[in-house]
Amino acid sequence: MQEPEIRKSDLETWADYLVDHSIGGVKAGERVMIKGERICWPLMAVLERKVIAGGGIPDVCLVPPNNDRGRVWSAAMGLHGGPEQITAVPDWHKARYESFDKYIEVLGAEDPSLYGGLSPAQAGAIVGADAPFAGIRLVKPWVITLYPTPGMAAMEGIPLEEYVDFIVRASTVDPRPLKAAEELISPLIDAGRTIEIVTVHPDDGRELRLTMGLEPSRAELCYGTRNFPDGEVFTSPDANTPAGEVFVDLPVHHGGREIRGIHLRLEGGRIVEYSARAGGEQLESIIETDEGSRRLGEVALGMNPGLDRVLKHPLFVEKVGGTAHIAIGRSYPECYVAADAVGSDEARAEIERLKGLGVINDSAQHVDIVIDFRPGGAGRRCSIDGRELVVRDGVWVPAG
């Protein structure tokens, strides 16, 4: 297999951003999990060295090539294991997750097709078994990045050299300047009551309207502290409120398969009808996972003008300036409490209260699906409390 060629200086720069900026550095004695497939080792090795240099303890978690994102089980367990086997997660797995202080995940697959072949029920069982460990990770400093591999380049339909160049260039740029543009949008979300997304259905030209309540959540600004590369402003809507229809035109790669042309209809916060022009079975496996996967957990605006091409991988497509995305499944609890209170007893109590009211959605799934508001895309208008947002110079800004 042809290995990607990445300059040592680029790997050093990339790793510096992940360690120093994304997870806030490493202190003596801190345990940092570094997770990824063997093919991602060139970047993981640099990360391991930098954690050690900072006085930390690296926990390198090498992922089998048939395991999507290093979940508790691989595709083999989903295909051949029974319910009792899938629920028999070893105690040490939970202990390992509870023991680390910070987390860096390097995505990038040797062969994305090895994740496929699961029925909706099998895929849902694997995701469900992994959900508790995703919950442990999300309350600690974490970041996810994407390493370019031949298998991922083939999935995108891009020559390897061209694909590597694009990924590396995007992953070695200082993300902090993105904050200034995001600060123009976040106050509207913080003060807003309702967001409306208008798309057009390509079959009949109908305008579709999807509305979501924004109270009581707040906006999160993303400039390299969770994903790398980055560039979005997101929040979690009141999961009881989404209503209407939406057409999602940009493709997304999930579980080794491509989903394209998604149409959803929602009533009372629940997805009551769904279809896809391609990958319908994969979409079904997502939505039918649990009760929470029939609801939405995120709405966001892509704010990175430097991403000048659309990839299928959600880490990249959702960041493209002039796009918007919603997520099927789990909410982000941190959107519902003050930033300086996250992790406190009061915040945990408030999150549990809002979960009980159905405002915060709980699900094993969180799958981003992306709408293109640039010329030629399905997106038509986006507004908060009636104030229109427009795309200018590759970023969202308030109209006027």
Image: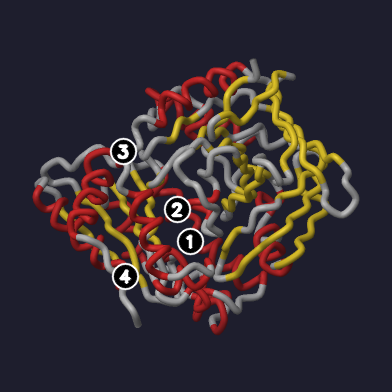
Q: Going from the N terminus, do you reach mark 3 or mark 2 first? A: 2
x 59%, y 35%: residue:
236
SS at mark 1 in the image: helix
* Residue bearing the label numbered 4: 4
Q: Are marks 1 and 2 in contact (CB under 8 Å)?
A: yes
Q: Going from the N terminus, do you reach mark 4 or mark 3 first? A: 4
Expressed as whole percent of the image width and height from the top left, the position of residue 27 reads: 15, 40
* Residue bearing the label numbered 3: 174
SS at mark 2 in the image: helix
Q: Amino acid at mark 1?
A: Asp
Badge 4 density bin: few <14, some 14–19, many ≥20, Cα 10 Å? some
Q: Are marks 4 and 3 in contact (CB under 8 Å)?
A: no
Q: Going from the N terminus, do you reach mark 3 or mark 1 first? A: 1
Q: Is residue 331 above or below residue 116?
A: above
Kindly indicate the quadrant of the structure image that contains residue 66: bottom left
Q: Is residue 231 left or right of residue 327?
A: left
Q: Is residue 379 left or right of residue 76?
A: right
Q: Is residue 227 above or below residue 358?
A: below
Q: Amino acid at mark 4?
A: Pro
In this orientation, which residue lies closer to the viewer: 268 or 90? 268
Badge 3 density bin: few <14, some 14–19, many ≥20, Cα 10 Å? some
Q: Are marks 3 and 2 in contact (CB under 8 Å)?
A: no
**Marks 4/3: CA distance?**
23 Å
Q: Amino acid at mark 2?
A: Ala
Quarter of the picture containing the C terminus is: top right
SS at mark 3 in the image: loop
**Marks 1/2: CA distance?**
7 Å
* Residue bearing the label numbered 2: 134
